[in-house]
Image: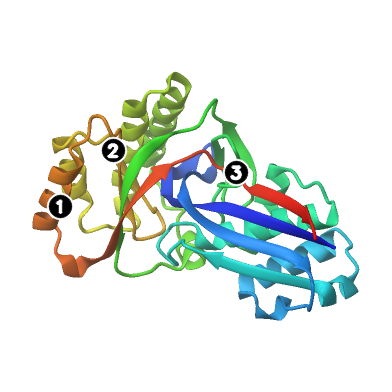
Amino acid sequence: MRRVKVETPGTCGEYIQGWYDGNPCLVSSPIDRYSRIIIEEGPGNLGLLKPKTQKLVAEVFRRYAIPTQEKKHLHVTMDSDIPLEKGMASSTADIAGMAAGLSAYFGLDLKQKEIGWLCTVIEPSDNLMFESLNLFNHLSGSVLKEFDGTVAADIIVIDFHGGIDTMTFNESQDDYSPDDLESFAEIVAQFEKGVRTKSLKDIGAACTRSAILNQKRLRKNYLDDLIGLSQDFGGLGTVIGHSGTVIGVMYDNGDFQEEAFLRAFKQVVPESAYAAVYRNHLIPGGIKITTEAV
C-alpha cells in the first residue's frame, strides 16, 4: 500500500494580471496558506469531493487511461486553510494538488506545465503549481514568458466581504483598450526587471499599477486608501485578487511600520467591510509531494 501527501499553496491573488501579446495572462502570488490532500488505498470516496476536483480526477483518469476500477480503491482526504471565492486560488490549489497527487500515486510523472494545462481544462487557473514565476495564460494553460526568480516578502492580506465566481468573471475580460494594453506591457517589463534584479520596490510598484488598471474591471472600494497607507508606512505595494475581493499590502519587515499601519487602516476602513486580516508570507510556488509506504 502507498500513501501520497500533497501540499499546495494558495495566493493573495496575482502580482499582475491583464492582456499581453494577444493573450489573457497573470502571475500568481503564492502565500503560506495551503490546500492539503492525502491519497491512499482504501474505500473509494471520490464521490464526496468538490465538483471541480471530481472533474479533474475524471480528466486524469480519461487522459492517462487509468483503469476505472482503480477509483473503487482510492481514498482521498482534503483540507484547506485558503478562504473560498476571494481570489486566493482555493480551487486551483485543490485541483492542481489533486493532479500532482494522482501523478505521484499512479507514476504518471506529470510536469508543472502539464499540471497547469490540466487545471485550465477544468476552469481558469492560477499558476501556483510552478516553482519559478511565469506569465501564464490562465485560460489555455500556456506559458507566455518565464521570469528568472521568485519573490519572498511579508504581506498583510485583507479579506473583504463578498465573493467572486472566477469562471463568470473571466468570460468578460477582453475589453482592454490600446492604452490599457500599452500600460500592461510596461507593467510586465517593470515586474520582470524587479524579479531579475531582486528589487522588491520595482515588483511592488508593478503590482500596484496592475491593481489600479484592474479597477476598470472589478472595482475595489478601498484600494486607493490602502495604496496610500502602504506608501505612508513603508509598504512596497498592493497585491490584489484581480478576480476576487482580497487586497494585500506587501512589505519588508525591517522597513514597515506594521502596527501604525494597522491602526490607521482601522480608522479608514470600517470593520463591517472586511471579514479578517491575515499576516502571511509571499513564497515561491510549487507543489510539495511526499510518498510513503504504509
Q: Is residue 40 left or right of residue 79?
A: right
Callout 1 secondary element: helix
User: Image point 71% across, 53% down: which residue?
Assistant: 100
Q: Of the residues shown, which amino acid type is indicated by label 2?
A: Gly
Mark nearest the camera among 3 and 2 is: 3
Q: Residues within 10 Å of mark 1 (few under 14, many from 20)?
A: some
Q: Which mark is residue 265?
A: 1
User: Image point 15% across, 59% down: which residue?
Assistant: 269
- The quarter in which the N terminus is drawn is bottom right
Instruction: Answer with mark 3 or mark 2, whichever residue precedes in sequence.
Output: 2
* Residues at circles 1 and 2 in contact by the CB criterion of under 8 Å: no
User: Where does label 3 land, which residue?
Assistant: 286
Residue 229 percent across, percent down from the top left: 16, 43
Question: Marks 1 and 2, Cα distance to the nearest angstrom?
Answer: 15 Å
Q: Of the residues shown, which amino acid type is indicated by label 3?
A: Gly
Mark nearest the camera among 1 and 2 is: 1
Instruction: Answer with mark 3 or mark 1, whichever residue precedes in sequence.
Output: 1
User: Image point 56% across, 67% down: which residue?
Assistant: 79
Residue 102 percent across, percent down from the top left: 76, 59
Question: Marks 3 and 2, Cα distance to the nearest angstrom?
Answer: 24 Å
Seen in the picture, residue 153 relative to 58 is either above or below; the reply is above
* Residues at circles 3 and 2 in contact by the CB criterion of under 8 Å: no
Question: Marks 3 and 1, Cα distance to the nearest angstrom?
Answer: 32 Å
Callout 3 secondary element: loop
Q: Is residue 120 left or right of residue 208?
A: right
User: Where does label 2 land, which residue?
Assistant: 237
